[in-house]
């Protein structure tokens, strides 16, 4: 998106910072973190780019506060972790489910509840916003959270081979040894010739 990062980066620049670096990291690294967090929000089907930009900047600022103390972590790693923390904490407040050791499940069920409650269509302006929230939004979120079920589990789906029909057949032919493939094409050509002779000389 075209939204400038300056509003997010400038507050962290000091006279002691190297040119082109913010919180000890390069601008390129923070731009990569920006794109990562932006993609996270887009995955939640958020399409209000102004709101997305504001949320990304908020998350980056949190990550930048940690960056000088965690020099072994990349900017993208810090930003992604902060995004997860912010979202999980917000889910805990809206759903009245204090984050615990099962934060991952709260985050997963919370994201599912967001989509089931049609947050992208009706409530984008409420996402990550501090309360109080509209009663309809809260009721919808809690209902969908419960609908996901306390025993909701992430399933591991084994990928099934796609049936591509003739395309897959031709692709498999390309894997055959050269001589065998040549023989197949010769037979195919002879068959076409036979069909031509039958249709033109016997009818």
Image (spheres, rainbow, N blue to C red):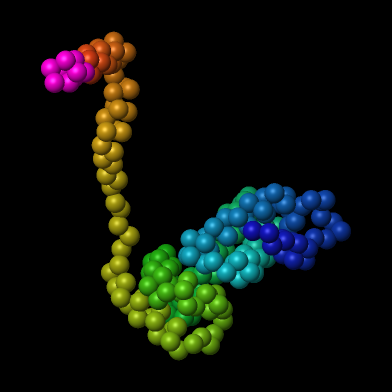
Residue lying at the far left in this picture: please name it: 202
From the viewer's perspective, is 9 left or right of 88? right
Residue lying at the far front in this picture: please name it: 203
Residue lying at the far top in this picture: please name it: 179
Instruction: State the quadrant of the N terminus.
Output: bottom right
Instruction: State the quadrant of the C terminus.
Output: top left
Comparing 189 with 145, the one in front is: 189
Q: Position of residue 56 (x, y in %)?
A: 62, 64
- Overall secondary structure of the magenta section: helix
Tag count in the figure?
0
Q: Is residue 198 magenta?
A: yes
Q: Position of residue 14 (x, y in %)?
A: 83, 61
Quarter of the image where one finds residue 68: bottom right
For the point 29% across and 10% down, the residue is: 179
For the point 78% across and 63% down, the residue is: 10
From the viewer's perspective, is 111 left or right of 193? right
Comparing 72 with 189, the one in front is: 189
Quarter of the image where one finds residue 69: bottom right
For the point 35% across and 81% down, the residue is: 143
From the viewer's perspective, is 127 left or right of 160? right
For the point 51% across and 70% down, the residue is: 87
Which portion, as a residue range, is magenta? 195-203
Above/below status of 174 relative to 42: above
Q: Is residue 7 magenta?
A: no
Residue 31 visible? The answer is: yes
From the viewer's perspective, is 186 left or right of 201? right
Quarter of the image where one finds residue 135: bottom left
Residue lying at the far right in this picture: please name it: 15
Q: Position of residue 6 (x, y in %)?
A: 76, 62
Q: Position of residue 189 (x, y in %)?
A: 25, 15
Above/below status of 187 relative to 72: above
Residue 113 visible? The answer is: no
């Amino acid at each position: 998106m075209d939204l400038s990062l300056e509003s997010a980066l400038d507050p962290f620049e000091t006279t002691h910072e190297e040119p082109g670096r913010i919180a000890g990291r390069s601008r390129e690294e923070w731009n990569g973190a920006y794109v990562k967090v932006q993609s996270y929000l887009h995955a939640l089907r958020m399409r209000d780019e102004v709101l997305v930009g504001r949320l990304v900047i908020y998350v980056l600022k949190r990550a930048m506060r940690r960056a000088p103390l965690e020099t072994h972590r990349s900017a993208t790693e810090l930003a992604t972790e902060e995004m997860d923390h912010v979202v999980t904490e917000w889910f805990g407040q809206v759903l009245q489910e204090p984050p615990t050791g099962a934060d991952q499940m709260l985050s997963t069920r919370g994201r599912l509840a967001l989509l089931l409650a049609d947050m992208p269509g009706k409530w984008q302006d409420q996402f990550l916003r501090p309360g109080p929230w509209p009663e309809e939004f809260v009721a919808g979120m809690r209902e969908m959270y419960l609908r996901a079920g306390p025993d909701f589990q992430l399933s591991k789906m084994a990928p099934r081979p796609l049936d591509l029909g003739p395309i897959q057949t031709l692709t498999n032919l390309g894997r055959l040894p050269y001589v065998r493939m040549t023989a197949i094409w010769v037979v195919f050509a002879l068959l076409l010739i036979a069909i031509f002779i039958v249709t033109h000389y016997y009818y």
